[in-house]
Structure formats: structure tokens, C-alpha cells
Amino acid sequence: MSISSAFAYEKKVGIFYDERFLLHDTGPNHPENPERLIPVIRDLKNNDHISSNTIWPNFEAATVEELNLVHTKEYIELVDRQISQINNSRAYLSTGDTPISKHTNLVAKLAVGAGLEAADQIMAGTISTAFALVRPPGHHATASMGMGFCVYNSVAVVARYLQKKYNLKRILIVDFDVHHGNGTQDIFYEDDSVFYFSVHQHPFYPRSGRPDEIGAGKGKGFTLNVDLPKASGNKALIQAFKSKLKPAMEQFKPEFVLVSAGFDAHEGDLLGQLDYTDEGYKEVAEILQEISDEYAKGRTLYMLEGGYVADNISRSVTQILDVLITSSQ
Ligand SMILES: [Zn+2]
């Protein structure tokens, strides 16, 4: 046996999860709670096909310097101060509807850190692609304002980190959460190096994301919003990816694909009403992997955003992981 064949291996898919994500306590009856993640992790670990084709690396909390790639120093200090003051009770961030408690700061920094480690491992080629199953979500957080259950905008920090550390010039962020990622759009609105594509329900929280919001300045044309009425279903979702995203990417040619993967547009979700199914998410993952394989050497990182029915998240994440596993073999 030659040395090269002894070390030959098929790249696995990374799953980035830390039990400390469960420590972010949002109080009784809040939809964004640890129970939405526990069954997902259990199901993935019990699935032989997933288990044998994935690795679950460790990672650290993001540093202040890393958060500062996107978030202002003032906002990072505000989060530190407000969370340190609440002891064993619960409160809301003064900037918006984001519940905070004793461990929220650590957990929010870990969520970002999961994405950073996943990005490093994908760039190093130790894994093919990854799914970071994090809490809290991030895409509503702007540079200076947490809102919509979000503290730090994990996917945005990962995009800036990839640019700084690896000198990537063109990054695509796809967002299929039922809500528009106003924070992500805002952060990159005048930027032509990060393309933001969102498909979301309208009218709905946070009310932004109309089709005429296309970016500004040199970022004009690098934001693409598709808003859908409730009950639109898979057909409208797939149509948006095929008729809007694919042609846009023929021009943009992304070097890395980041996905704000919310599952609150799934049929039966507690908040969203777009009625996608597991198969819809699978088809989206196939389209995204085609784009990623064509332009980005397959480099794709999904990060969990919303989704409030654990069984739906579990089945849809499994479908997406199946696509990632198949594409890496
Ligand atoms: Zn959402």
C-alpha cells in the first residue's frame, strides 16, 4: 500500500454543535428554546448514514476582535454589560426583542465561533461542507442592534472572517428563513463583495426585504429579495432559486456559499406560513450545491437560524446533510 492510498479518505461533512447551546435560557413558552434543538441532535446521532459520514469538531467562542469584524465596539460592550447585570433572572436586550439570561453571552459567542471553525476547516479541506446547529439565531442582528431573538449576526461575522483571513473576494449569503434577514442585508447593503439573497414571507416580521431593496452605492445589485405570500409552498421557493439566484450567480461567481438556514417556513411551523416541506429543502440544497460546485469548489456552510418545530428541523436538516454527503463522495 502506498503512502498516499493509506492516507486517502473521502472528506466528511462537519456538524458543529456544542451542548452549551442549550444554556441560553429564553424562559417558559418562548419559541426559541433548547427543546427545538435537543431532538434534532438525538436524531442525527441515531442515524447511521449521517453518523458514519460526518465529524463533530470542537470549537471556541468568538473573540471580541472577531465580533468586531461586523459589530461595533459599543454594541459588544452593551451586550456584555446588560447580560452581566441580570444574574439569575431574565431580561431583553435594550436594542430589541432578544431574550437574554446568565449564559447568553457565552452561547451567542459560541454560535459565531462554530461558524468560524467550520469556515477554517472547509478552507483547510479537512471537511467538505458543514452545518452549524447553533442557538441563538443571528440574521436579524445589525452591526449595532440585536433584535428578533438574535444577539450576534453569526453568518455575517463568518463572511467578514473569510474575507480577512483567506482574502476571498466574492461571498454569497443565501437566507431561506421565513423572516427577512434585515441585519444581514443592512450589514452588506453597500458592499459588492457579499451578495445577499433572501426568500421570505411578506407581509411579515421584520417587514423589510421588498424586491425593490437591491443594495446601494457600489452594493447596488448585490442584494436580491424575493418576498412570498403565505401558503406559497415549495414551487415558489424552487422557482425563486432557479429563476432569480442561479442567473445572478452566473454573473457573481461566489467563492464561498453561506446559508442562513431557518426552518420556520416549514409546513406546520409555529411562526411561519410558507408551507415548504422536507423535499423543498432538499431541492434547495441540491441547487445550492450545484452553484457551490460550479464556482466555489463546493465550499458551503449552513448555519441554523429560526424554525420552531423540532421534528421539522430534524427531517429537513437530515435531507440537507444527505445532499452534502452525496456531493462530497
Ligand atoms: Zn425566522
Image (spheres, helix red, strand yellow):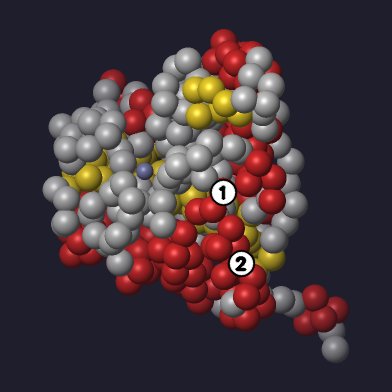
Please state, as top left, top right, bottom left or bottom right, where the N terminus lies in the image. Answer: bottom right
Q: Is residue 138 left or right of residue 197?
A: right
Marks 1 and 2, the one that precedes in the sequence: 1
Mark 1 residue type? Pro
Residue underneath mark 1? 34
Rendered residue at 41%/51% (across/down): 308
Frontmost residue, 22 versus 228: 22
Residue 104 shows in the view? yes
Residue 279 shown left or right of residue 171 in the figure: left
Quarter of the image for residue 112 reads top right
Secondary structure beneath dot 1 equals helix
Q: Where ligand 1 lies, by image quadrant?
A: top left
> Is residue 162 shown above or below 258?
above
Q: Position of residue 113 (x, y in %)?
A: 65, 40
Residue 46 is situated, as x and y percent measured from the top left of the image, at 62, 75
**Residue 142 visible, this orientation:** no
Residue annotated with mark 2? 42
Q: Does residue 305 appear left or right of residue 37 in this picture?
A: left
> Which circle marks residue 241 in the picture?
none
